[in-house]
Amino acid sequence: MHRRSFAAGLAASSALAVLPRQGHAAEKVLRVGMTAADIPSTTGQPNQGAEGIRFCGITAYDALTNWDLSRSDVKARIRPGLAESWSTDPARRTAWTFRLRQGVLFHDGSEFDAAAVVWNLDKVMNNQAPQYDSAQAAQAATFVAPIASYRVIDGSTVEIVTKQPDANLPTKLVAVFMSSPKRWRDLGGNWDRFAAQPSGTGPWCIDRVVPRERVEFSRNARYWDPARVPKCDRLIVQPMPDANTRGAALLSGQVDWIEAPSPDMIPRLRQSGMQIVTNPYPHIWPYLLSTLPDSPFRDIRIRRAINLGIDREGLVAMLGGTAIAARGMVVPNDPWFGRPEFQVRHDPAAARRLLAEAGFGPRNRCPATVLISTSGSGQMQPLPMNEAIKQGLEEVGFDIRFDVMEWETLRGRRRAGARAPENRGAHALNSSLGSADPTSIIDAVWSTRAPPVGLNWGWFNDPRIDAIAAAAEVEFEPEKQDRLLTELHAAFVDNALWAFIVHDLNPRALSPRLRGFVQAQSWQQDLTSVDFT
């Protein structure tokens, strides 16, 4: 963003901070600085990763299932959303019945019903439907991948049939959002027009969209869940990809809340009375490794060597203690961690030995190209962190080259997979990812879940791991599924399928004027409880 237009955007938002109303107290306007370089898409399936879902997904839209973000002491779980309940046929385990919440209205006043659910699934799955939108379909692809068919049973009931038994369908549907069919039709069936005048069912209504500058929301006073009617009158979200810019905006009073403050600025922010909020949550910042024939990481010795060559504690110090060293996809005290034999740690001598066994050394360094971003959802401080990693890996015998790009471009390269033409010559990809649900582990290692239907970016294929993943996918008893997931995660670590780097602590900085925020153990957060003192 050009400095002049960025400054103009800040000035405009500052002017909106307190708006007196005739005969009433001033409006309460919550202003947020996010890490993305652009505002997320507003049609219903946001881009910009989990941060896009946080600010333009669960704000303005609902899904059939929602995250329970009301607690900070436990990992967030799924709860009813636009569907009050769901069940699956115990005989087939492929047919799911969703009973919908009645009396829910879209922001335009039209009624949410079963026909609207089918219309929205067509929006992202049926390329023959008039409302099909390829941009939204790309964002929803991994979430709807298990679905074979869907139909209206009656006005308040929908059936969704999966291609095979899938115990995790309700978790996947939490990110499939419902847009208003009426608003789309009223705007001539044009998604670009819809983006400027969106209509969902969420607790916030989008009032104004200024590309690359801000999205303005107002409270949905008739939201179907009275407990989640926003405490603030308005919400303004602005893209601020530079961490120092976000910190300066908070200190100057131009915003009330920033995502991912710069570690260097945290002491100053604290001294100024800002609230620094952190909490462990299911999230990791790794390198996804390609196992294709042209990648050095096809060799497990080199995959293990890169894991042993990374100084995670040094990175945690660089981040001001707002992260913890990763030993796998999930933290060691997670029920799914298991008992891997390979211990992820910083051991340069062991890394050199493994590289030597694979034919590399000081005079013949192991070359690897890593795709990285300049900023983005959950990316923390990607450029200095990656430079520190590169320096450490060069000391053990790697020759790392970075291909640097904007966050949404990187996400597109992740969705395409290592085998895609645009990723030719790339051996790893640095992308923050969540691990809140069983699908996150299953999709990362199962050979059937290569992009675009899953997270197996590197096209790893192992029949033994496939068998565990397949069993976990169809296990409907939570305790039995947990046991399979611990076995699967242990195999994930033993095969060193990723370079496991750090789990961030989801840091954000809030004005001392704010109250009521509950930092959930989730990448998603609920802004409806936030109020001003």
Image (tube, grey):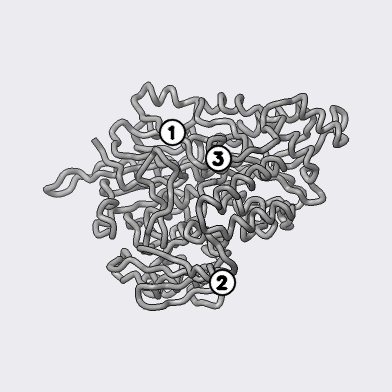
Residue at (52% x, 63% y) in the render: 136
**Label 1 is placed on what type of residue?**
Thr
**Label 3 is placed on what type of residue?**
Gln
- Count the numbered circles shown: 3
Residue 37, x across and y down, in percent: 51, 45
Residue at (47% x, 47% y) in the render: 51
Q: Nearer the viewer, residue 158 or 235?
A: 158
Answer above or below: position of 520 versus 123: above
> Of callouts 3 and 2, which one flags the residue occurring earlier in the amino acid sequence?
2
Residue 163, x across and y down, in percent: 59, 69
Q: Give the residue number, with chain letter if any, for mark 1.
A: 278
Residue 311, x across and y down, in percent: 65, 27
Q: Measure the alpha-carbon separation of dots 3 and 2.
A: 34 Å
> Of callouts 3 and 1, which one flags the residue occurring earlier in the amino acid sequence?
1
Q: Give the residue number, with chain letter if any, for mark 3.
A: 379
Taking the image as drawn, is residue 159 in sight?
Answer: yes
Q: Give the residue number, with chain letter if any, for mark 2.
A: 148
Taking the image as drawn, is residue 108 in sight?
Answer: no
Answer above or below: position of 323 versus 369: above
Q: Quadrant of the C terminus?
A: top left
Q: Measure the alpha-carbon separation of dots 3 and 1.
A: 15 Å
Q: Nearer the viewer, residue 369 or 188?
A: 369
**Label 2 is placed on what type of residue?**
Ala
Q: Nearer the viewer, residue 398 or 142?
A: 142
Q: Measure the alpha-carbon separation of dots 1 and 2.
A: 40 Å
Residue 377, x across and y down, in percent: 52, 44
Q: Which quadrant of the view contains residue 43?
A: bottom left
Q: Is residue 260 left or right of residue 79?
A: right
Q: Are marks 3 and 1 in contact (CB under 8 Å)?
A: no
Q: Nearer the viewer, mark 3 or mark 1?
A: 1
